[in-house]
């Protein structure tokens, strides 16, 4: 029903407007008596064989929602009814910020892709934390994807990540440090070995000082070379990370894109996600899994638009997978399709 009815209507709207329209109306719909039960009946598929234990957390199934869709944790209860095994909120910064000027989100329908330069638009860590405290579904595993504010210089970035960590530590189950978004000026410079080790060590020190430390992961770009990926694995060992998220969006514009180059260029800068990222993201997962000898859990993301896409990520070495662009193009039925395909 989504692809036949809802999607054609939503795709007539500007991409960001469609996002807010969907969120607002899903919130209203789910508030009606019995609506959440109906949503569960339509989309939620659970089976004992789907359960996974990864970095000490018990997931009801391995299919999660990637960061970027529910940045401000406004729809976690509703998303739980659609069968997700976990939801990653954010990216959340210490202080609220509006993000980059609009328009900043564009569809490439011929490629089943998106280009975004949102720029960490979010309500700020304090507001998001309070919202999570009030959620009804306390069983849903929540990941907290954290970043720095745009006006914070890179030399002070660690302070922002620690501040966001402190605000969210009681209300999320795991953390993801995001230094790989292409939409905050200079952010990807923090992926370089020396600044990244320093940043992660400071966040990890705060984490390990807690009575119950949270699993700490790092989200990486698909644009890294093999040598840089080797550095990431060394950094992960040195800073005792619990895992990696592979991958974020890409700044590349592949020649294989079906969308006319003039249209792509007109959309401007931003991260490309969706089907064009599928193979590269899987390559990165396979490389990291092989080089780490399977010793470092990986959440696989990037171009998952079908059950087979998810199976390919898991076969490459991912322990869990996440959807974003595929969820927009395929609809909520994709979650159950993947989970059903995973049941022997």
Image (cartoon, rainbow, N blue to C red):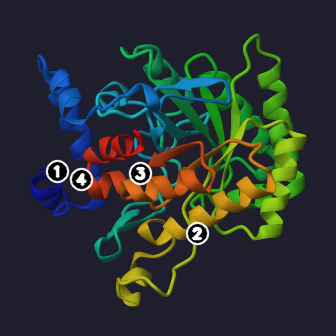
Q: Which residue is mark 3?
A: 324
Residue 128: horizontal and vertical position, in percent? 48, 27
Residue 144: horizontal and vertical position, in percent? 57, 33
Mark 4 and mark 1: Cα distance apart in space: 14 Å
Mark 3 and mark 2: Cα distance apart in space: 16 Å
Q: Earlier in the sequence, mark 2 or mark 1?
A: 1
Relative to 338, 284 lies left or right: right
Report the number of numbered marks: 4
Q: Which residue is mark 1?
A: 2
Is residue 270 something that shows in the picture?
no
Q: Earlier in the sequence, mark 4 or mark 2?
A: 4
Q: Residue at x 61, y 57 (%)?
A: 316
Q: Which residue is mark 2?
A: 280
Q: Earlier in the sequence, mark 3 or mark 1?
A: 1
Residue 226: horizontal and vertical position, in percent? 78, 69
Within 10 Å of the Cα at label 1, are there few (<14), some (14-19), or many (20+) other Cα atoms? Answer: some
288 is higher (above) or lower (below) than 22: below
Mark 3 and mark 1: Cα distance apart in space: 16 Å
Mark 4 and mark 3: Cα distance apart in space: 15 Å
Pointers 4 and 2 in contact (C-beta within 8 Å): no
Camera-near label (4 vs 1) is 1
Within 10 Å of the Cα at label 4, are there few (<14), some (14-19), or many (20+) other Cα atoms? Answer: some
Relative to 133, 78 lies left or right: left
- The foreground one among 77 and 320 is 320
Looking at the rendered structure, which numbered label has been put on residue 129?
Answer: none
337 is higher (above) or lower (below) than 231: above
- The foreground one among 236 and 14 is 236
Looking at the rendered structure, which numbered label has been put on residue 18?
Answer: 4
Q: Earlier in the sequence, mark 4 or mark 3?
A: 4
């Amino acid at each position: 029903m989504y692809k036949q009815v809802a999607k054609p209507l939503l795709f007539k709207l500007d991409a960001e407007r469609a996002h807010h329209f969907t969120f607002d109306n899903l919130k209203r719909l789910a508030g009606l008596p019995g609506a959440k039960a109906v949503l569960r009946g339509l989309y939620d598929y659970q089976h004992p064989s789907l359960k996974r234990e990864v970095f000490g957390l018990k997931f009801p199934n391995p299919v999660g929602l990637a960061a970027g869709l529910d940045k401000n944790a406004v729809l976690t209860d509703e998303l739980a009814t659609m069968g997700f095994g976990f939801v990653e909120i954010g990216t959340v910064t210490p202080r609220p910020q509006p993000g980059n000027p609009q328009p900043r989100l564009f569809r490439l329908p011929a490629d089943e892709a998106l280009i975004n330069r949102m720029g960490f638009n979010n309500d700020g860590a304090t507001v998001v934390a309070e919202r999570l405290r009030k959620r009804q579904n306390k069983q849903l595993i929540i990941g907290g994807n954290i970043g720095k504010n745009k006006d914070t210089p890179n030399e002070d970035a660690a302070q922002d990540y620690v501040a966001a960590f402190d605000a969210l530590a009681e209300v999320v189950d795991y953390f993801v440090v995001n230094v790989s978004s292409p939409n905050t000026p200079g952010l990807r410079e923090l992926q370089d070995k020396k600044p990244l080790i320093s940043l992660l060590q400071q966040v990890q020190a705060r984490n390990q000082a807690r009575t119950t430390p949270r699993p700490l992961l790092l989200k990486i770009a698909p644009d890294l070379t093999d040598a840089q990926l080797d550095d990431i694995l060394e950094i992960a060992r040195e800073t005792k990370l619990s895992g990696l998220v592979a991958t974020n969006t890409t700044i590349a514009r592949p020649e294989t894109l079906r969308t006319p180059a003039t249209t792509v260029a007109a959309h401007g800068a931003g991260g490309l996600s969706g089907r064009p990222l599928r193979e590269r993201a899987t390559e990165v997962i396979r490389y990291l899994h092989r080089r780490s000898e399977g010793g470092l859990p990986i959440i696989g993301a990037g171009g998952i638009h079908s059950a087979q896409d998810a199976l390919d990520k898991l076969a490459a070495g991912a322990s869990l997978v996440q959807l974003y662009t595929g969820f927009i193009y395929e609809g909520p039925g994709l979650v159950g399709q993947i989970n059903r395909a995973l049941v022997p």
